[in-house]
Image (cartoon, helix red, strand yellow):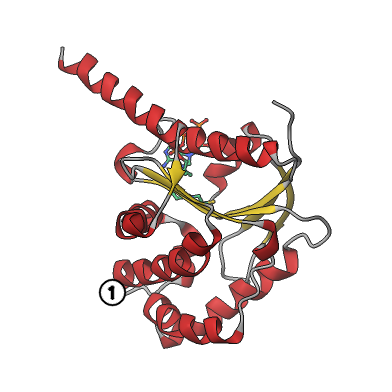
Amino acid sequence: MAGSALSDEAFERRKRAAAPRRATIADREQVIDCLTAAFATDPVMAWIGRRDAKRDKGRRAMFSFLVGTLGLPGNELWTADDFSAAALWVPPERADLKLPWWQELQMLPSIVSFTSFSGLGRVDAFRKSAEAHHPKTKPHFYLMTIGVDPKFQGQGLGGALLDATLAKIDAKGLPSYLESSNEKNVPLYKRHGYEVTKEFRPAPDAPPLWGMWREPRKR
Ligand SMILES: CC(C)(COP(=O)(O)OP(=O)(O)OC[C@H]1O[C@@H](n2cnc3c(N)ncnc32)[C@H](O)[C@@H]1OP(=O)(O)O)[C@@H](O)C(=O)NCCC(=O)NCCS
């Protein structure tokens, strides 16, 4: 009986991820917690971020900045109602990720917390290479980040959330772009219609990223 109760729970959780809502300021901390936990073993975050005991706190500072600066104001930060999964999309008007100078300044403490002073060069290398490979021709949505609570990864939540948010982008008739920071995720994105456009490394000792593009689909 315990087994079937658990699978019911998993089913309900997946249903919540398939019907996400826009996150509000009241959801801020829980969405940041979800993303911080999700990326604990991400190869690119691990390469950019600090390697000492403050790394979890530093990653949280970075997600806190991204949620506060791009997620909530962009109104394309989506969460499952139980915060088991969240996705931060950047709408086309901000998809070039150019921040005004005052936001660049505001970002500095988060970056230092994330990577420490000795890692500033890695942040710079990452931003420059991501910018160089980011498509510039067509207006598109940019998937800045998607994460599932590690307790629930591999249970269909990420795919459900991705599909639900892509349906809204499809309805607008717009393409989308993302960088996969983990080779493990490439098949998942391919299943949802993305194609690899580029594989690149921000530096010779950095892990690879896969730039992936998706044309809108009719549903
Ligand atoms: C990537 C992520 C959002 C996918 O969500 P998910 O709910 O775990 O994935 P789903 O169950 O919907 O789909 C499973 C597919 O996801 C991929 N995957 C990536 N990480 C996975 C993990 N930790 N566990 C299981 N599947 C994972 C695989 O392609 C898998 O396909 P397979 O079953 O054919 O191997 C989630 O695993 C996650 O948060 N990972 C850590 C953060 C991250 O990598 N974010 C995306 C950065 S580009």
The residue depicted at 44 percent of the width and 39 percent of the height is 20
Please say if 50 is above or below 23.
below
Q: Reply above or below: 27 against 9.
A: below
- Judging by the rendered image, the residue that carries numbered circle 1 is 54
Residue 179 x/y as whole percent:
62, 55
Who's the residue at 34% across and 42% down the image? 84
Q: Residues within 10 Å of mark 1 (few under 14, many from 20)?
A: some
**Residue at x 48%, y 71% (from the top left corner):** 48
Q: Position of residue 208 (x, y in %)?
A: 61, 59
Spot occupied by residue 95 in the image (x, y as percentages of width and height): 67, 62
Relative to residue 200, is residue 107 drawn left or right? left
Say whether residue 59 is left or right of residue 180.
left
148 vs 211, nearest the viewer: 148
Question: Circle 1 — which element?
Answer: loop
Q: Residue at x 72, y 53 (%)?
A: 140
Task: Report the amino acid beneath label 1.
Answer: Lys
- For the C terminus, the quadrant is top right
Q: Quadrant of residue 133?
A: bottom right
**In this picture, is 6 found above or below 114?**
above
Name, please, the residue furthest toward the top: 1
In the shown orientation, is residue 39 left or right of residue 10?
A: right
Residue 30 placement (x, y as % from top left): 30, 54
Report which quarter residue 154 is drawn in: top left
Say which quadrant the N terminus sits in. Answer: top left
> Which residue occupies the extreme left position in the image?
2
Number of numbered discs on residues: 1
Q: Where 80 sits versus 97, above or below?
A: above
Residue 27 location, quadrant: bottom left
| Ligand 1 closer than 8 Å to label 1 CB | no
Viewer-closest of 210 and 148: 148
